[in-house]
Image (cartoon, rainbow, N blue to C red):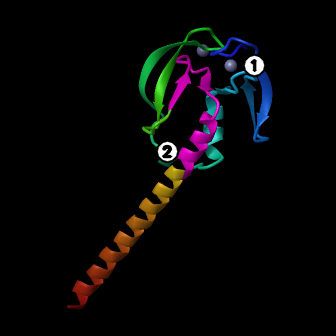
Amino acid sequence: MNCPKCAITLTRKYYKGMIEVDYCPNCRGMWLDFVELDQLEDVAFDEDQFKGSLVHRECDVDCKCPACGGHMHEFQYRLYNLKLDLCPEKHGFWLDAGEDERVIEIMRTHQDRIKRKKEAESEWKNFLKGLHSFFKQV
Ligand SMILES: [Zn+2]
Ligand SMILES: [Zn+2]
């Protein structure tokens, strides 16, 4: 497979010792299979039901999928300020250098937010419970 940005051959490498990715030694971008993006996110946050939808505002871009040669789509990643490329035929995702770290960072932030939300919800429930028993006493 060739790099969609600089067309040189991608080399296999173990990312963080757990995901086998195709890596471009020139631009340091990497190609992730469709499931591998999820595995990358799981490094930081693995509760899929709280992740929200992945792809927003897709649009056609010039670079080509290393697997099928079709045009890739650029999309906004989970409503965060990050743009990634994907193959509309679901072959995988292209991450430019550093975008993998952004994904992990975003997932950490997201996890904190979900945790705070859960805590706030249970505090609210406790508050209501307290209120309820207060009125029962009156
Ligand atoms: Zn490259
Ligand atoms: Zn493809």
Pointer 1 residue Cβ closer than 8 Å to ligand 1:
yes
Local SS, label 2:
loop
Question: Where residue 118 sits in the image (x, y, percent)?
Answer: 44, 62
Seen at 73% across and 22% down, the residue is 24
**What amino acid type is highlighted by mark number 1?**
Leu
**What amino acid type is highlighted by mark number 2?**
Lys
In the displayed structure, does residue 115 sit left or right of residue 127? Answer: right
Question: Where residue 43 sits in the image (x, y, percent)?
Answer: 66, 47
Q: Earlier in the sequence, mark 1 or mark 2?
A: 1
Answer with the quarter of the image where residue 16 lies: top right
**Most foreground residue, 116 or 100:** 100
Seen at 59% across and 49% down, the residue is 45
Q: CA distance from mark 1 to mark 2?
A: 30 Å
Q: Which residues are magenta?
A: 83-108
Residue at image mark 2: 51
Answer with the quarter of the image where residue 25 lies: top right
Q: State yes or no: residue 89 in magenta.
A: yes
